[in-house]
Image: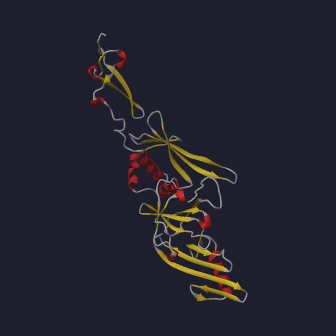
Amino acid sequence: MKRFKYFVLTGIIITCIAGCRNNNTVTVPVEDYIVEDSDDLGNASIGVADDNQQDTTADILYDAETIRKILAYKYSYEPPFHLDFSHEDENGCYVYHFYETVINEDESHTATADWFTVDPKTGETTTFYGDTFNLEDYASYADEGGAPGYLFDKFLHGEIDAEVLKPLEPEEWGFESETVNISVLNYEPEEWSWDAFHFGGKLDLDNDGENEFILDGPYGGMYFDVIDGTLYVFAAARGNAGGLKYTYYDDAYWIVYHDTTHGGRLCYWLYKYEGADNLVDSMTLMGFVNSEDDKEFTFNGESITEDEFDRIHDEIFESKDEE
């Protein structure tokens, strides 16, 4: 069979889309595209010089997760809003969806707040409403470890664990796990169920001027705080004899553990913080009612009357919430 040698007689022009908007033309020398000798055309192979192969990621300044982190800081993003990478568009730009999950009695839906289109090679960003800015102006935010809402949302998405802040009060009750993953909590973000966890809002529960995150759930759920770039569980229910709630009393929020489900028990353990890792005060209010003739009431270990118990209880739990 005759042997044929095929030469590419002209240069090959390859047009590439560089970035999201600029066109660059690259001319590849003819020597780099030579079909090797072959016994038949079907076995022809094309040899390409290695030094002409291009790394399409070489010019990327911001990866997808860094962009998400910067946007989370810039827009003070916190749940119930979500900031998710959506897709890469035809120009190589990264598109992010900024939305809220709205849960009603019979249905749930997403409500879009904005869309962001980001050029990862330049940092140029355009919002759905036509506003533009460059990530370079906010790049320092990426070194902060993560905005509190950003970290909590990563926890809700199963991307990170939350560490358990020790000691977790009441310390004598203990807490087996060192970390918590959302996968073990029966998290149901789009519907309410008494035995499932769902986002319950934000409050400054540790009185440090910044909101903490409430994850409602069985027996009261869990409360979360971010300390030095790490997400912590700083309060958690322990079952029906260790329910969790909070109250606003004496110009501060108090974390409350309670046992009021067992017959005759009206027991409360209260903790006040100034920062989730800084316990500054605690109280106990206890009532044990076995019968009309067998009752015992204490406040901070001191014996009190039933009327005094009722008065203190009402002051603590029926005070007007912070405006």
Where residue 231 appears, as percent x and y from the top left, is 46, 61
238 on left or right of 150: right
* Nearer to us in this view, 44 or 21: 44
* Nearer to us in this view, 179 or 79: 179
Question: Is 192 placed above or below 294 here?
Answer: above
Q: Residue at x 43, y 36 (%)?
A: 92
Residue extending furthest toward the top: 2
279 on left or right of 39: right
Question: Is 181 placed above or below 35 here?
Answer: below
Q: Quadrant of the C terminus?
A: bottom right
Q: Residue at x 38, y 28 (%)?
A: 16
Question: Is 10 placed above or below 173 here?
Answer: above
Q: Residue at x 63, y 61 (%)?
A: 195
The part of the image, by quadrant, that contains residue 13 is top left
Where residue 169 appears, as percent x and y from the top left, is 51, 74
Where residue 306 appears, as percent x and y from the top left, is 68, 86
* Nearer to us in this view, 249 or 165: 165
Residue extending furthest toward the right: 292
Q: How is the image coloured?
A: secondary structure
59 on left or right of 271: left
Q: Is residue 256 visible?
A: yes
Q: Is residue 245 visible?
A: no
The part of the image, by quadrant, that contains residue 15 is top left
Where residue 132 appears, as percent x and y from the top left, is 46, 42
Q: Quadrant of the N terminus?
A: top left
